[in-house]
Image: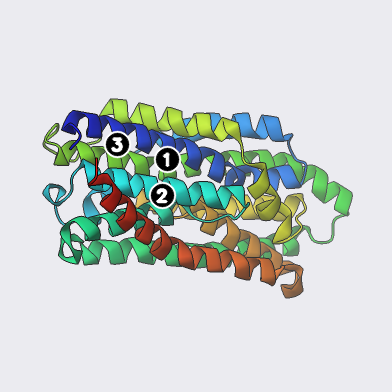
């Protein structure tokens, strides 16, 4: 059996790796619309997103407390092996979907991995059914809200600006996209980076290193920096899927999608609810596209993405079970 201090260090390392991968896996979500409409160069967009991801990650710790405190009934019911297994499961799923350019959810992968590992270690009775239900509900409802918000916003903008010449519209909304993309990147950091913070803090509480579920400052800074570095690595494969394959956007639709996504994610962070940036952005893009015309959205691409989303939690949970069994040999 490996030393407990080593296992805790391994948890921290893997959580930061997860945040790094989450950074380049989900960078595309924050900048895909801006890059696809050529409002900003990819390199500049990635740097901007990295900085704002870092700043957003330091905003609060409410989502971290939800991830670390609401999935398991008590921190005493988990150990470092469980958390290591959950992180490895999430990392494996993220790398597979990134490699194939599938915009799946890092949040779903982490939650699925943790549920599977906890169930394997302590049984389903260790899981907080009510907390998991709330988390899953927020993950399911948030893209629907984003789709509705994107649709309404686009309808309003078309009503106000629809009669202007396309060149005039594109020029104006390209500038506005810089603001909406910045808001999107900041909100992404404020929600996504907290998930790894919650996992590390859960390990610290279960290991007896801290008494209460208050995220230490060094954990905040480490997770924020890791996500920012991952963001700087970029994610071109997913940019193509998010920015062009679902619906071919122009600056006004890109602005609408970014702003809708930023609003939904920011509200979720305010209420301490974890959401999937991938799902929210995809929902916004579909809503914006539908506002122009239903056939403008490539629903077959959306269907394939939905299938990946549905499969993420059960498959990552299964991998979490296998990874936990594997940790028992060390």
Taking the view exactly as shown, the residue that stands out farthest to the front is 329
Coloured how? rainbow
Q: Residue at x 31, y 30 (%)?
A: 219
Q: From the viewer's side, name the closer residue of 287 and 207.
A: 207
- Residue 6 x %, y %: 23, 29
Residue 100 seen from this side: yes
Q: N-terminal of the two: label 2 or label 3?
A: 3
Crowding at mark 3 (Cα within 10 Å: few <14, some 14-19, many 20+): many
- Residue 109 x %, y %: 42, 54
Q: Residue at x 52, y 46 (%)?
A: 95
Q: From the viewer's side, name the closer residue of 104 and 170.
A: 104
Is 120 on the left or on the right of 48, as rendered? left
Is 60 on the left or on the right of 120, as rendered? right
**Is the C-beta separation of discs 2 and 1 under 8 Å?**
yes
The residue pinned by badge 1 equals: 18
The residue pinned by badge 2 equals: 90
Secondary structure at numbered mark 1: helix
| Alpha carbon distance from label 2 to label 3 | 13 Å
Residue 61 seen from this side: no
Q: N-terminal of the two: label 2 or label 1?
A: 1
| Vertical comparison of 312 with 2: above or below | below
The residue pinned by badge 3 equals: 11
Q: Which mark is residue 138?
A: none
Is 25 on the left or on the right of 212, as rendered? right
**Is the C-beta separation of discs 2 and 3 under 8 Å?**
no
Secondary structure at numbered mark 2: helix
């Amino acid at each position: 059996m490996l030393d407990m201090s080593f296992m805790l260090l391994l948890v921290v390392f893997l959580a930061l790796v997860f945040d790094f991968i989450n950074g380049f896996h989900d960078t595309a979500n924050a900048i895909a619309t801006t890059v696809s409409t050529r409002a900003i160069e990819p390199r500049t967009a990635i740097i901007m997103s990295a900085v704002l991801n870092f700043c957003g990650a330091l905003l609060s710790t409410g989502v971290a407390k939800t991830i670390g405190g609401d999935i398991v009934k008590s921190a005493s019911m988990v150990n470092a092996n469980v958390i290591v297994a959950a992180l490895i499961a999430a990392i494996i799923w993220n790398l597979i979907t990134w490699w194939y350019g599938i915009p799946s959810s890092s949040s779903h992968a982490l939650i699925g991995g943790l549920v599977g590992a906890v169930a394997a270690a302590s049984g389903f009775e260790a899981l907080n059914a009510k907390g998991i239900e709330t988390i899953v509900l927020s993950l399911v409802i948030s893209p629907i809200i984003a789709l509705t918000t994107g649709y309404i916003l686009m309808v309003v903008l078309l009503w106000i600006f629809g009669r202007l010449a396309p060149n005039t519209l594109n020029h104006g909304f390209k500038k506005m996209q810089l603001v909406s993309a910045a808001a999107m990147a900041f909100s992404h950091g404020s929600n996504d980076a907290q998930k790894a913070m919650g996992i590390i803090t859960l390990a610290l509480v279960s290991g007896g290193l801290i008494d209460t579920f208050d995220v230490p400052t060094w954990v905040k800074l480490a997770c924020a920096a890791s996500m920012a570095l991952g963001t700087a690595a970029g994610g071109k494969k997913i940019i193509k899927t998010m920015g062009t394959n679902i619906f071919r956007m122009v600056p006004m639709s890109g602005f609408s999608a970014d702003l809708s996504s930023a609003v939904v994610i920011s509200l979720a962070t305010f209420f301490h609810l974890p959401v999937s940036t991938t799902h929210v952005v995809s929902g916004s893009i579909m809503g914006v596209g539908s506002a122009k015309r239903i056939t403008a959205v490539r629903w077959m691409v959306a269907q394939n993405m939905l299938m990946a989303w549905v499969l993420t939690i059960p498959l990552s949970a299964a991998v979490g079970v296998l990874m936990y069994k594997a940790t028992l040999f060390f």
